[in-house]
Image: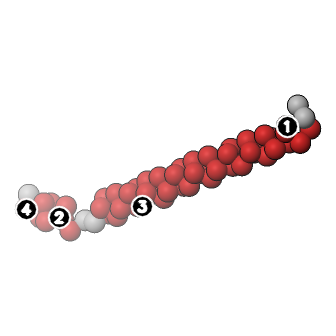
Amino acid sequence: MTKIFARFMKDESGATAIEYGLIAALISVAIITGATLVGTNLGSTFSGIATDLETANGD
């Protein structure tokens, strides 16, 4: 029984999988945050362009 427990304590494959999962989660959060910020800025830019075009056409 102690050999099984000792082998279990030395096994790091689960820890490695968890680390990869955490890294993937952090990268996902960074991508989502970046895409949200870019989308908001693009929306503001296109709204400003639409407003400028409407005032230029006299609509």
Q: Position of residue 14 (x, y in %)?
A: 31, 59
Residue farthest left in this picture: 2
Side (left or right) of 40 relative to 53: left
From the image, which quarter does the N terminus lie in? Answer: bottom left
Q: Please give the residue where the numbered disc 3 appears in the rendered image.
A: 23
Q: Earlier in the sequence, mark 3 or mark 2?
A: 2
Q: Amino acid at mark 2?
A: Met
* Tag of residue 9: 2
Marks 1 & 3, CB-CB < 8 Å contact = no
Q: Amino acid at mark 1?
A: Glu
* Tag of residue 2: 4
Q: Position of residue 38 (x, y in %)?
A: 62, 52
Q: Position of residue 49 (x, y in %)?
A: 79, 46
Residue at the image position 92 percent from the left and 38 percent from the top: 57
Q: Earlier in the sequence, mark 3 or mark 4?
A: 4
Marks 2 & 1, CB-CB < 8 Å contact = no
Kindly report the distance in space between the C-alpha atoms of the residues bearing marks 3 and 4: 33 Å
Q: Amino acid at mark 4?
A: Thr
Residue at the image position 81 percent from the left and 44 percent from the top: 52
Q: Earlier in the sequence, mark 1 or mark 4?
A: 4
Q: Position of residue 16 (x, y in %)?
A: 34, 64
Badge 3 element? helix
Badge 1 element? helix
Q: Amino acid at mark 3?
A: Ile
Q: Nearer the viewer, residue 48 or 20?
A: 48
Residue at the image position 43 percent from the left and 57 percent from the top: 26
